[in-house]
Amino acid sequence: MVIACHITFGAYGFWLPNDPRGSWSEEVWARHLRPFGSATTVQTQRSLAHKDHDRTKRFQAKQQLKYPAVKFTGVQARAVGRGFARIVEQLDLRVHACAIMPDHVHLVTARHNRDAEYLAGLLKRAATRQLTAESLHPLAGYRKGHGRLPSPWVAKCWCKYLNSVDQVCRAIRYVEENPVRSGLPRQRWPFVVPFVS
C-alpha cells in the first residue's frame, strides 16, 4: 500500500526529453530540440543525474531553448518555499522532506486524497504565483501576448510511490542530502513535518 510519494519536478530547461543520460519522455515535441536527437526513454526508477554522458551535446541543446534555462537564486528559492507553504496548508498536505534546488525540486509527501501528479501541479502554480507576487519570476523579461509570463517549470513531474517505512526513510535522506551533495547549505522549511512510522 502506498504510504508516501517522492515527487520531483524541474525548472524550465532542467532535463530535456533527449537528454543524453536518458529521460522519461517518449517524444521530442519541440522542433528546435529535434536536431539533438530523439527522446531518450528509459524505464529505470533510479536517478540518472550522475550517469556519464555527452555534456557538450546537453549544453548545446539547452542553448536552443525558447527562454534561458531557469536557475533559481537563493532569494527565489525562498519565495518558492513560501508558495509551497501556502498550498501545503490549504491542502492539509504532510511534507516530510523538501529540497528546492537551483534547477529542480524534490519533496517527500504523505499519502493524500489527490494523486501526486496533481499535487505537483498545484505546488508549481503556488510557487509561480509567489515568485510573481514578489517580482522574482525568473522569466519576467519574456512576457508573452496578453502580458502572460512563461512558466518557470517543466510541464510534468516524476513520482515514485513509496510502499514501506524503509523506502520513505531512504527518500527523506536522499532529499535532505541533495543540497549538501551539491555544495549548498542544508535546507529547513517550516512546512516540513517529521515522518512518524
Image: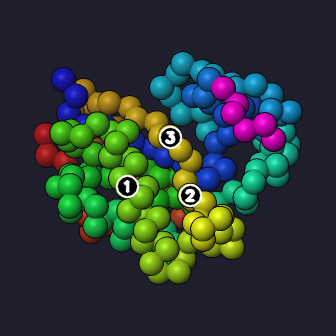
Which residue lies most toward the left here?
197
**SS category of the residue bearing label 1:** helix
Residue nearest the viewer, comparing 133 with 45: 133
| Helix, strand or loop under label 2 | loop
Compare residues 64 and 21 and report the one nearer the observer.
64
**Amino acid type, mark 2:** Ser
> Can you give x and y, in whole percent of width and height, for residue 139 in the image?
64, 67
Q: Which residue is mark 3?
A: 156
Classify residue 189 by image quadrant. bottom left
Q: Position of residue 40 (x, y in %)?
A: 68, 25
Q: Of the residues under marks 1 and 2, which one precedes in the sequence?
A: 1
Q: Main secondary structure of the magenta part?
A: loop
* Identity, as a three-letter code, of the amino acid under mark 1: Leu
Q: Which residues are magenta?
A: 27-32
In the figure, 145 relative to 104: above or below? below
Mark on residue 50? none
Q: Please tell me which residue lies in front, 123 or 46.
A: 123
Residue at the (61%, 39%) spot, across then down: 49
**Distance from the alpha carbon under mark 3 to that under mark 1:** 12 Å
Query: Is mark 2 in CB contact (under 8 Å) with mark 3?
Result: no
**Mark 2 sits on what residue?**
151
Q: Quadrant of the N terminus?
A: top left
- Which residue in the structure is indicated by mark 1? 123
- Quick check: 189 left or right of 91? right
Which quarter shows the C terminus? Answer: top left
Q: Could you tell me residue 132's position as x and y percent?
A: 49, 74
Q: CA distance from mark 1 to mark 2?
A: 13 Å
In the displayed structure, 193 sits above or below 110; it is below
